[in-house]
Image (cartoon, helix red, strand yellow):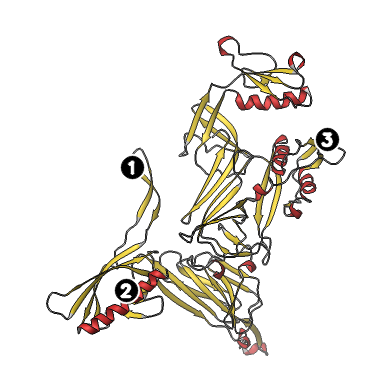
Amino acid sequence: MDRLIYLAPDLTEIGPCRADADFDVGAKGTASNDFVLKGILPEGIGGVYVPGTEFGGMLEYLQTSNMNDVVTRKGFTWRGLLEQGVILPPSGSDYKIVSGEANTVMAGLLSGFMGGFFHVSAEASGIIIDNYKFPLYCTYLEGLTGMLQEYDAKLVITADKPSAGSGPVVTVQAKPRVTIGDKYSEEYPVSLTYTDDGMGINHLICLGQGSLQSRTRVDLYVQEDGTIGTQQYYTGFSERTEVYDYSSSESESNLVTYGKRRLQERMSKKTLALNDADVDGDIGDLVYGYMRGISTTSPITRKILTITGGIWKRESKIEGV
Amino acid sequence: MTNITYTSSDGTVFDLMADMSFRLKKAQFHNFEFQPDVTALQFGERVERWRQGAATYAAQILFKGPRSARMAALDTFHKAIERDIICKSPGILTWGNSYISAYIRSSGTYPGESNDTETYNDVEIYCPSPAWITEQHIIIEPIEQQQSLRETDIQYAPSYGYDYSYMKFQDTSKNIYVDHFVPCDFKAALYGPVAAVDISMGNLSLKVNHAVPAGGRMVIDTREAVEADRHCYLEVNGQIRNCFNDRDPESTLLGKIEPGFNRVVYGRTTRLELTIYRERSEPGWTG
């Protein structure tokens, strides 16, 4: 049922919602992971959701005016709620380290979060986590998506009503990410933007612990094929250099790991963006696009659902857009 | 002659065709317009969807008769339409069997030219939703419990020496005809006693896991204008309880019914009343 449904504060369903709504879900830093409801809203509502999707959440903000009856209410989406808690290292340990089947690992992590609000799928994901070390004091969303990304997997969140008489249950699940494609090319009526950005850097000087001459230093270079290595390829006029200051890095290998991530963000690259289209995939899935002889594979980082005057508009944002 | 009335939100009915003292002279209730939402193409446009804004109709009402009577009639009418505006509660304009929610948002009066027996009232009727509705009522009566199993004796050729008998189930389904050209909103009321609501209607599945006691009824109303907690409710002795949370997750509780023949299947131990809301952009020409 493709409908927005009002929920009471105890999660029981009240009825269909006709208000204007705007949901924004996605990876940390790309989406606000909240939602807005606007209109003449009934009393006693606690949240909203679209069954079978991750669009939904509980209302925690209200703004009203004495000039009209229109009320603005906001809240965190289900995904946004995962940003409201921090993964702590166990006492006596520096880091939280996990191993095992991905859904079992997540079930262990989320069992104590928000009173067990999130249900973790009991289905075996086929993804085995091996001694994954969470970044220090990261949020649940950051930690879980980062962990799954390492294993080429995605975090899927859905809210569904399991049976008559019950409210929705919010389920999180690890799934291998898939590549969606073959219809996102210039041959189809989709809006694509091709960008060849040659203004990036190709040499990153990574500075770690220590001071002055004794400071740990690693030089990373972009290679001809776009990979990152320690041998310089671009020299002379083509060399573009930047400094990455990571004085709190624990070791040289840690500095290299984060330095590579930084260089991947800052290097020259070619991107193909899919504009304002709804891609039938989950956040984390890869989208294959082809244009002007260039093909790219970029992850879906954000999904937006806008309901205005009863008209639903879904958009997917691909990395680089 | 077509019956045309305006019923203000307090229930006062103004019969606009009743007699010569208060009569609708002109109106364009059959005007309508759609606007396309388009995407510009290199050559032409692609229609994404069609929209229809609120409907407005200019109308002229003639008040006739002695001055004091006309003034009194105008006073009553204008108080009623102004009350609708202030209370933000629309009246109902009917044209034959069709009706539409309406406000009368502007009014101008002027005397007739001939003598002091006429006052003209030009009004603009504003309808936030442009849909004129004609209701179609369908009632499916229950099969009597004793008759639901019907014994039928079959006489066979005398050579058999004895007769067989068999029990035939009466059909618990009924074909209904939705007399329209597009899917329609509807209201279904299933009367108790039933242990749970389980109705199949065309390609719709109305399942609510809640008992309906004798004397009560479960109402499922798909119309958008209905308040959020009044789409699925149990009504017993005038008391209403929202049952939307008791819907089966797989049921298409708020879908529209398809036009044409629809097979309705349920236990048929109790009465089922259906009201089909057939929407058009103008009042039906033929009812």
Which residue, given by chain and number where applicable, does mark 2 sit on? B286
Asked if labels 1 and 3 share a chain, the reply is: no
Q: Can residue B38 be seen from the camera position used here?
A: yes
Q: Amino acid at mark 2?
A: Thr
Q: Is residue B222 left or right of residue B82?
A: right
The residue at 66%/86% (across/down) is B164
Q: Give residue B142's quadrant in the image.
A: bottom right
Name the residue beneath numbered marker 1: B44
Badge 3 sits on which subunit? A
The kind of residue on which mark 1 rests is: Gly
How much space separates mark 3 and mark 2, taking CA atoms? 81 Å
Q: Element type at marker 3?
A: loop
B22 displayed left or right of A288:
left
User: Which one is in front, A137 or B150?
Assistant: A137
In this view, the mark in front (3 or 2): 3
Tag 3 residue? A94
Residue A223, percent across and down? 64, 18
